[in-house]
Image (cartoon, grey):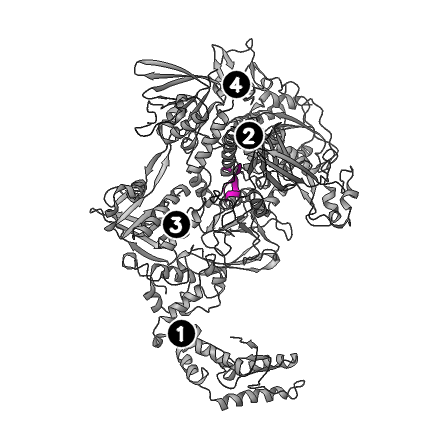
Amino acid sequence: MENQSVIALNALDHGRCRPWPFLQDFCLTCGICAGACPASGVDGFDPRKLVRMISLGMEDETVSERWPWICTMCGKCANLCPMEIDIPGLVQKIRSRRRREEVPGILHKGLEAALETGNNLRLPKDDYVFILEDVAEEIAAEPGFEGFTVPIDKTGARILTTIHNKLVNTHTEDLKHWWKIFHAAGEDWTVPSENWEGTNWGYFTGDDAAMKTMTSRIAGHMERLEIDTLLWPE
Amino acid sequence: MNKTALIIGSGTCAKDLAETLAASGVSVLVAGVDGCAPAWGPGRTPNEASALLEIMDGAKIRFITGTAGGFTVEFADQDRRIRREVRDILIAEDPVPQVNGSLYGLTEGAGVVSLSAFKSMLNPDSGNSEAFESLSRVAFLTGALDESLPLIARDVMQAALDLQQNKGVQAYIFTGNLKVAGQGLETLSRNAKEAGVIFIKNTERPPEIVQAGDESITITYPDEVLRRPSVLNPDLTVVDETPLPSPRLKTLGDLFELETGPDGFLQADNIHRLLTFTNRKGIRVVGPARGVFPPVLIASEIAHTALSLSRTKDAETDEKNKARIETGKCVRCLTCVRICPYRAVALAPRPVIAAAACEGCGICAAECPCEAIAFDTFPSTATTGAVEPESEAGGNRSGASDFIPHVTVFCCSRSAVPARNMARAMNGGFPEGLSFIDVPCAGAVSRLHLLNALSNGADGVLVVGCHPDNCHSGGGTLLARGRSDGLKMLLPRLGVAHDRLAFKNLAANMGAEFSQVLEAFMAHLESLGPNPMK
Amino acid sequence: MAQNRVLVVGSGIAGLTAALDLAEAGVFVDVIDQYAFPGGQGIRLSCKATDTCVKCGACGVDDRLGNALKHPHIRLMTGSGIQDVRKDNGFNVRIRQAPGFVDPNRCDDCGICLSACPVEGGILQGTSGHHRPFYAVNESACLYVKDKSCTACRDACPTGAIDLDAAEKTESIHAGAMIVAAGFSIHSPFEKPYGYGVFPNVMTSPEVETVLKRRARLVRPSDQSEPDRVAFIQCVGSRDAKLNHLWCSGYCCGFALRTARLLRHRRPQMHTTIFYIDIQTFGRTFDAFYKETRESVRLIRSIPGDIYPSENESLKITYLEPDTGETLQEDFDLVVLSVGMIPPAGLEALSKTLGLRPTPEGFLGDGNGIKPAGVFPAGAVTGPMTLAEAAAGGAGAAWQVLRYLKNSQR
């Protein structure tokens, strides 16, 4: 499973990644990152291994492997690393070096859809609003939730929340957990009608420009609707 | 009395020591055991205290007589015999660096150099800068097979950093455990990494290093982080050097009857000998004569030695605690001469104890077959065991029976007595029935002490001494255990259970263990009942 | 006559070694220590000998303390600190000594005060036979000192040895030179992912030393039982750029290997595991000791990343298995954190008073370019080191002081 080919140090340019700002050269090889990582050992992923490969200048090989895409970017490694190495930053950088056609799975396709339509599924606005209102009706039919409605694009609300695409696709029931809590708490909340996508696959695929676009849209909603607090569960 | 110090050494440590002492007003005589004294070469003269510094070049040391405060040293200079009186003897012999090439299966040559040689190459004064132009990769080997040392790791990392930063050559450090315990070493390793030095560490499987006929080197190793085989062909391989004890130390050790450590250096591996003491008063070992230490530590030792030696008043000799041989009883078996760990028994011509060297351990008295050696403050063999036990209200007793065992506990002054004080403080006292007899060393407790204790009324006898390697007298605690073990074999023939006699090793800071040992022993004696010899 | 009097700040191994060397050379030495019991950190260590001594040097501290207490040229003051210093042909130092609440002539070490005290840490216990009395009132925790609200210890003491109204003392000393041997403090690892302070069976190395010293066995804090599976985690708070602790503390590998080996010797059914980065050398026969210890102690070359509570207050640790790259989980009954050394409490203030400048790491280093005349740092206050190195440092400082005194006489 793991790559077993011989590493020829003579053929490597160890200085290649040295200018990167992630402090990877200070690694003590202590392994605390891998000890904390929920994905270490899965399909060949190992944060300590990644740090060392970059330190040795093995950029090409790392970019071409699949295992750097296993990382969930949870950040436990960086939180613990005694040398303050920014491992998630390293992961992002490696991912950004890969050609977009070679980004694994649906990550880039979903991102393209989101950049073009405001959500990973290319779900039209009307369909989206219909689904939200449909779920709201079901909630309103339950005892204690009479009169429940879903506030969309409400100016001046206290909280803006985003929506993960699966919640308007295969897991619509899960919307109810959020919304019932808001209702019971008497919260003043709202969701956007467009560019509502809660995931940011620009972040996951190391596509900084796309990540910025997705984030700016959410920030734009906050400005437009005059809302100070963002609840971004993704 | 002559206050001269004799420094024996042929290298830089002896020189530094000599200059420091002379500068502090101590008269110094410098010589080498085999005639090779350190050379104050042209351009480097001893400092202005040279009136106090005499160098005996070419004269070999033949033997010494006397003791602390008054040694006579005899030198042989070709046909001449020279005798000098000195107060103190200091051994300061530089180490012999063993290049670890053969450890890795390598021969020094164009592709393999020692760390010292490489450091010289790096030295800007050496005029070697072109040598680096042809290099692109240099491998350093330190502790890749056995363990390195902080002292060596410092030199290796410094050299690698210099190479990487100032010569633009890629450095690789191969090691097992990276040694960073020392001032500034962690920062140095970080700086080296920042400059681009690559560290390759192995745990179980060391690198395979092959030196081909054309002197090219191939290093193959499993990278433990990447879990893949890796290969490097360095242009140059630098092997470290292990400082070994100079062979002159063995000669001196035999000549002066000094303890040798397990590593061949001229000091027992015993914390009582810290910093520079040996088993013989008046003879010290400094710096690389006693082990491998960084320069900062050696400087402190030299300072410490200078302080001790520049005392104008001699330490007072406490006559009361010295052994005395009663000539009427002595049969000149020479047991005391042989057994004294401090070499304090001289033949003049009968055995006589040199008070200046005697440390009052009592081993000689315990070993003397004629009971011919006396101490003023020593427990008499005749009365041990007959002394009434102290009655204290503290501690724990199992209370299982009404029988309160009378236990005689021989306590070594260096371990058992402080441990006992700690135990007493922790428990607020001891149970009834204990008689404590303090001895300077467990080795002072003779077979007669033990037997008489049992026949005078003790239900049990316990001897508490220091751990082996922590005995101030070197082997006193081992002698004591040996006597106790031997006696335990005989006791059943006297109708006495062998476990009425026990020997325990403890240290000065083991108060809790002291209490536990006593409790367990007393509980056991309670179950055995009173001593049938009573 | 200041030229023959020296003030030593700190009564650990460095301070005691310096004091003894100076005393033997005829100098009068005042040794002050801010804590209730002398001997520094070294006197709190337990013996790790199995059949033979393992040369940790701890009993050497007891030895020196005993000699210092007997020496006619040495005066030892505990609970004492410097209030101010004036240069005046030497140093005029004003020292404040905490009240002597416990009368050594009446106290018989029964320990009833400790049981009676309602505050945790209100009564302190010694760790050596040279600590007499063996109990002390902790001025900073005592309720009576705070607001006269509690007299439990005084009331319970059967010999009337406790005087809660005892007064502090101040005195001025005129010393020709000073040695700063203030030692170090210990890092408290609350910020690490090991649940220290949350899970009862996670202890630090000094806490283990105290338990071994008092009980001669290692027991779990939760239920006082002896653990069957013990994990040591190395370098906690050392070699850490995040904490700005860029040093190796030097003592912890020796502590872990010696302690694990001792535990296995005393209780062979115990399993001990040491998680480490690089094992440091100690002693003169390290290779042989290391090899022998590895036969009974399991060494794993990675540092655990997480800890979870398990059954019966045990801990589940997750760590990288270096050989296979798997992340494994394993249960331990007790987890010992080998915590690092940090600069001693009060060093900043003391440095300001004396004109010393600590390095960015907070220790005194080699003076950092600033060497106020007549003040000589020694021992671990200059940077993490072992007992033997600190003893040598004390000896070196004593020599420098003697030369300084001689030169300043001219």
Q: Do the residues labelled 4 and 2 touch (CB within 8 Å)?
A: no
Measured as percent of width and height from the top left, residue B343 is found at 48, 20
- Magenta span covers which residues? C372-388
Q: In the rendered view, tell whether residue B331 sits above or below residue B273.
A: above
Quarter where residue C49 is shown: top right
Measured as percent of width and height from the top left, residue B402 is found at 75, 33
Return the residue at label 1.
Answer: A207
Measured as percent of width and height from the top left, residue A150 is found at 59, 86
Q: In the rendered view, tell whether residue B453 sits above or below residue C37.
A: above
Mark in front: 4 vs 2: 2
Between marks 1 and 3, how big is the CA–CA gap?
41 Å
Which SS class for mark 3?
loop
Return the residue at label 3.
Answer: B204
Return the residue at label 4.
Answer: B356
Between marks 4 and 2, how big is the CA–CA gap?
22 Å
* Chain letter of disc 2 in the image: C
Q: Which mark is residue C22?
A: 2
Measured as percent of width and height from the top left, residue C102 is found at 73, 39
Which SS class for mark 2?
helix
Query: Do marks 1 and 4 both belong to one polypeptide chain?
Result: no
Between marks 1 and 4, how big is the CA–CA gap?
83 Å
Residue C253 can be seen in this image: yes
Q: Do the residues labelled 1 and 3 touch (CB within 8 Å)?
A: no
Which residue is most to the top? B328
Quadrant location of the N terminus of chain C in the rendered image? top right
Mark in front: 1 vs 3: 1
Q: Which amino acid does label 1 sit on?
A: Asp
